Image (tube, rainbow, N blue to C red):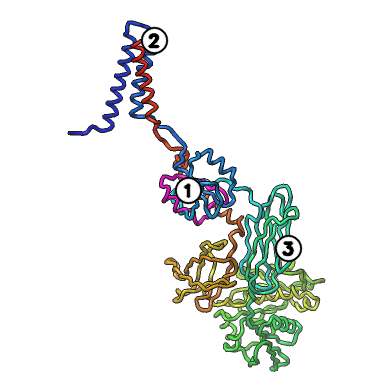
Amino acid sequence: MAIPSPILIQYGLAGACLLLGLGLVAAAWRRPSRRQRGLRALAGALAAAALWLTAYPPQRAVPAARAEAIVLTPGYQPDTLAQLRRWLGAGTPVWRYAGAPGPAGARPLGSLLALAEQRPALRRVHVLGEGLPAAALPQLGALAVQVHAAPAFAGFATATWPRRVQLGEPLLVEGTAAGAAGAPAWASLRADGAGRDSVRVPAGGGPFRLRYRPKAAGLARYQLVLRQAGQAVRAEPVPLEVTAAPRPPVLLLSAAPSFEFKFLKNHLAGQPRAVAVRTGVSRGLTQTEFLNQPAQDLGRLTPALLARYAVVVADVASLASLSAAENQALRGALQAGRLGLVLLADAAPLPAATPARADFAVVPRPAAVAPQLLAWPDAPAAVRAPLPATLRPGATLQPLVQGPSAALVAAKRRFGLGAVVVSVVPETFRWALAGQDAGYASFWNRLLAAATPAAPAAATWRVATAWPKTQNATGLQLAAGTFPGTPPTVRALAGGPAVALPLRQDPRLPEWSTAVFWPAAAGWHQVQGPGKASFSFYVFEPGDWQGPEAQQRRLAAAQRATAAPGAALAAADAVQEPWPAGWFFGLFLLAAGYLWLEEKL
């Protein structure tokens, strides 16, 4: 026996109710008495309609209390919570996340995965307070997330600085500050126990840029302070590692005794740096000096001798006097990337033995009445020098030092794997005589650094997490030629056991490996391995640098809201459910009862 389908049953019941209604209305109009004819017809129609609606009640939109949830994070406003609960309904569940306080009845939430497990009917989550970490948002799956605005933040919204600075180079701290409206603020950098630089921030917030030159190498923890109306609004740590600049040995070749090479020799030896000097005294006779290294034979430039030095500083006369064998040894070391050359030129054309001579065209200048102002990046002070010549700019030349009207006076050019630097700035020793030691040191550090060969590639570490904090996953990335056989270790420098770092090799780039570390304490940590590789990084307290983290959370939430389909968000506002059938059955009883009672009376 075939079972009728629900559609046939629905159509059959609709036809029966329609016939019942029409019959009751017709009976009311055909009755002999006209008393209450209209009310009887209306009651008959209502009784038939109520009978149909009892079986198939209509749908209505109701607040989706069971499809919504509220997640409280630290810093939420109780007024916002009360207003949201009135809008969603008192039955909306409230969860406390990341240790946030909450009202009575709010349940703690250790993981966002619990929402999907315990509330499978959830469609949307309302987040109050600071927000959810960007790394935790994927745990919500397809749930829509609506972030309710947190109170205005006062502090540092963004900040950037190099985590590693060489000694002698300046530290630049840049970012934006968000302060209360109505009064300007001051952003200052405290280092080595004192305020080093400060800048005024407009009322309501704005950018800042602070500068300081560290005085000692090592691990440092400076502080960035925001003050408004004489009160400290926010203070954030600025950790960095100040490394001692590499001091590779230098060989000085001078055709005759000169103050230029004498001052340069003393300056390099005082850094300290290993220095060897070969000075021509007369034809076929040379004088040698050795500082911070043992004596050796400098009579001829051989590959074995040049392998002991990283940079050769020579004047044009000494370069022109080299023999063919010495020239070949110098060029071979340059092309192999084991050596760099700094050539001190004058107004005459460069000697034929100069490597890459065709690219260094010397242009003589008329005798200047006064020394000319020189400029290069991060020059600590204004320095001047007479300029007998300039270098013609070229596509292969990298400018190092410039004179008036951007004239090129010192430039670098790659030669094989090495580098050649040519300078036409004479008598730089006069800067040291005039007390401009910082300018003198900066000039020569720039030239020597440009000529120094790059260090051989070694295993290097980097922190993949922007703001590593305690009790949060910190990503560490290793770049090495081969995958280490023994896992490296990490430990807190303040004390504690060393923890092994299991590495996961990237299948796309085998030289990259990643590890996840969960720091238990704030402060400096050190990674050891592979081999002799060592790397230091800083772990912040949970309350540090909340401004940049809040921006990351807002951006992640906005990207998630953009990616979510609009229909799902609209459907989460309300759910469709049928009206209670008892209401329509009661209407049927009232209409039928009226017809029965009116007939009896």
Q: Is mark 3 on a helix, strand or loop?
A: strand
Magenta includes 131? yes
Q: Is mark 2 on a helix, strand or loop?
A: loop
Q: How many marks?
A: 3
Residue 323: x and y, percent?
62, 89
201 relative position to 138: left or right: right
Say whether disc 1 or disc 2 marks the residue closer to the N-terminus: 2
Residue type at numbered disc 3: Asp
Q: Distance between the residues labelled 1 and 2?
A: 62 Å
Asked if the residues shown at circle 1 and circle 2 are in contact, with their CB atoms under 8 angstroms apart, the answer is no
Residue 360: x and y, percent?
65, 74
Residue type at numbered disc 1: Ala
Q: Give the range drawn in magenta.
A: 112-137
145 relative position to 256: left or right: left
Q: How crowded is mark 3: few (under 14 residues within 10 Å), some or many (20 or more)?
A: some
**Residue 355 visible in the current orientation:** yes
- Nearest to the eye among marks 2 and 3: give it: 2
Residue type at numbered disc 2: Gln
Q: Which residue is drawn at 69% across and 80% down?
A: 271
Q: Residues within 10 Å of mark 1 (few under 14, many from 20)?
A: few
Q: Which residue is drawn at 63% across and 55% down?
A: 157
Task: Report the residue marked by disc 2.
Answer: 36
Viewer-nearest residue: 545 or 480: 545
Is 578 drawn above or below residue 186 in the view shown?
A: above
- Nearest to the eye among marks 1 and 2: give it: 2
Q: How far apart are marks 2 and 3 (CA)?
A: 95 Å
Give the number of the disc on residue 563: 1
Asked if the residues shown at circle 2 and circle 3 are in contact, with their CB atoms under 8 angstroms apart, the answer is no
Give the number of the disc on residue 197: 3
Viewer-nearest residue: 267 or 425: 267
